[in-house]
Image (cartoon, rainbow, N blue to C red):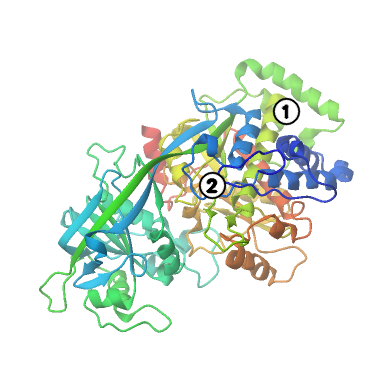
Amino acid sequence: GEEGFGEAPPYFAVRLGRCVGPGVSHAERMSFLRFSAQFLYHTLWLGDAAADARGAVMCRLARANRASYLSAQARLDVPMAGHSRGFLAVHRELKGAEAAVAGEGFVQEVPMQAVNVSLGGAGVPARIAGVGFGIGEDAAFGSEDPRVGEVRLDGEALWFGGFCISAPESPWRWDDFRGEEASVRGKVVVCLGNQPEEFDEKVRDAMERKPEPGKRVLTYFGRWMYKLENLRRLRAKGILLVHTEASYSYPWSVVKNYAAVETLMLRDDPDARGEGTADPPPPLLLRGTLRGSARLAQALGFPAVAAVGGTPAGIDALFAEAAAPGFKVRPLVLPNGRDPVTMTVALKFERRELRGKNIVARVPRLAEAHKEKAARQAWEAVTAEGISIAERLRSIPAPDILLAAMAAPLERAEAVIVSAHHDHLGMKVGARGEDVIFNGALDNAAGVAKLLVLAKLFARLAKAGLCCKRDVIFLVPTAEEAGLLGSFHYAANPVAAPLASTVAIVNFDGMNIWGETDDVVGLGDDLSEMGALLRAVAAAEGQTVSPDPDPDQGNLYRSDQFPLLRRGVPALKLTHGAAFRGRDAGYHERVVGDYNRRVYHSTGDDVAYINGFEAPYEAGALQEVRVAARTVYALAQSDWTPRWHEHSPFKKASERERDL
């Protein structure tokens, strides 16, 4: 415990820091919304009129961000009494808004399982064509079925599905199964990561803003999550994904680390049970990832030659075959061309039940009955400040705020979501005196702080009758680091508003503490008209919109906007660009790159790192909050709904949600 927090639960600890000057009291730490509202009001709405108060308010924001630090989580399964102090702080501060979960207040429980996987049969490794594969060094295994205690395959014939993509009607016109879908029913299929390079060229042609030459553009069809979804739809028994660093954009060590520890899964996964289909397919019995090594090449009948600075030749041959026009799923056979490549494995699953917690709050839309009162309050708010707030808002691409407050309400209830996850990685085993806490200062206490700023802003605007025509929902999900589990659960159980009436989601994951930029990035902006909105907002802030700097990484699919995006909700993950004002061309790579390489997902992501930069909460952070506030306001205070671009793979999902 620290300064008024009492004794911390055994799996949690709170890291709280200092701003400048004397020590910060417990009361100051816990008054986040009061301070953050002043910060946003003075810097966004009143501009230079509050310049004298700016420094003090920034210091308060810094304190507040520290107060919202997520407790280090050794486990995500501790019930409410033992949830992170950061969770409790966010839960308490969002009570300035309205509870959004009927009968449950602000908390949406997320039923999960913690799963340990081991090799059965006294640790005998899995075997493919007689070649052994151990957990961690060579493979990672699991099952989508939350009920199974063991999985046994004995001489199971394997099939090769190439990239395992079924998209004959998409703009890319690619189908690895070509009328052979029935062939993989009940089979275990080997799938390559990523997508054919032909996809990249077609995607690049469809994009309004082209990425840097030479950069690959990963679509949803290239993500491992899509391949699971597709094989499940085809009623396969299992999937074996082939990992190479080139195709996954991260090393095998990432997979190895997850394979060696207890992992989390949703206990009642609507995707795994085939929700929404007349004849739901069963979950995949076997889900595995194989290291694309010389060992795997040998098992598949290629020479066992180790790779020198790249992928083994045999694995490269599989990629070349899968990328060739006319490829079609086929059984894997040994070099004699006759005998099948088979797999034998015995897996044991130890499971325990647990519950995570999403926080969900709502700032409700203005009702018809409140129009006259809202208009009067809006005018009083303007005259009380002695300044025309409406003038300050004219640059926002939405109707004038006073006129909009008096406008007729929408024909149906609609909503906009703002999200930021509250979990992190927990603690590690370390020597005495070693820092073992993954603090999560930027990832994602800072993102939660931005969300809380907007929650207070929109609550105050609503109270003054200045906003909004749509509900603004604040979603703070759990278990993002475990695979977006909290947001997947919300997407399947949207307690605050049906997805069919949710017009957009804006997600935060981190904060720009490194300085102002001339550009902003909105992951997902090329899929819908959200891109046009972001360009208008950026122009109002004197910025341009840059394309995803790392389109080959698939970052759009790795944060909490994605589960709603794949169900048809237009999305933006807002972040900063790389053109830092007053800095040399190499500043982004040198400074932000250092964070990504050395600090991200390490115990060094703490308040000391943030305070190592000059005025970390004032320049780039302020820009990000203003861009987010303008974007959310434009969506919440208008009747405009962003439409999908034709090349978006999520356009059909949107149509399905609206047909339900």
Vertical order, 631 against 138 (above or below): above
Which residue in the structure is indicated by mark 1? Answer: 402
Disc 1, SS: helix
**Percent of width and height locating residue 58:** 79, 47
Q: Which residue is mark 2?
A: 11
Label 2 neighbour load within 10 Å: few <14, some 14-19, many 20+: some
Instruction: Pick the residue in front: 95 or 317.
Output: 95
Frontmost of labels 1 and 2 is 2
Residue at 62%, 44% in the rendered image: 448
Q: Quadrant of residue 128?
A: bottom left
Which residue extends farthest right? 52
Disc 2 secondary structure class:
loop
Q: Residue at image x 54%, y 26%?
A: 105
Tag of residue 543: none
Residue 634 can be seen, yes or no: no
The three-letter code of the residue at mark 2 reads Tyr
Give the image quarter of residue 656.
top left
How far from the left and from the top, in percent, is residue 396?
69, 41
Q: Quadrant of the N terminus?
A: top right
Q: Amino acid at mark 1?
A: Leu
Q: Is residue 127 left or right of residue 530?
A: left
Residue placed most toward the observer, 178 or 559: 559
Who comes first in sequence, dot 1 or dot 2?
Answer: 2
Residue 459: in sight, yes or no? yes
| Residue most extreme to the top | 369
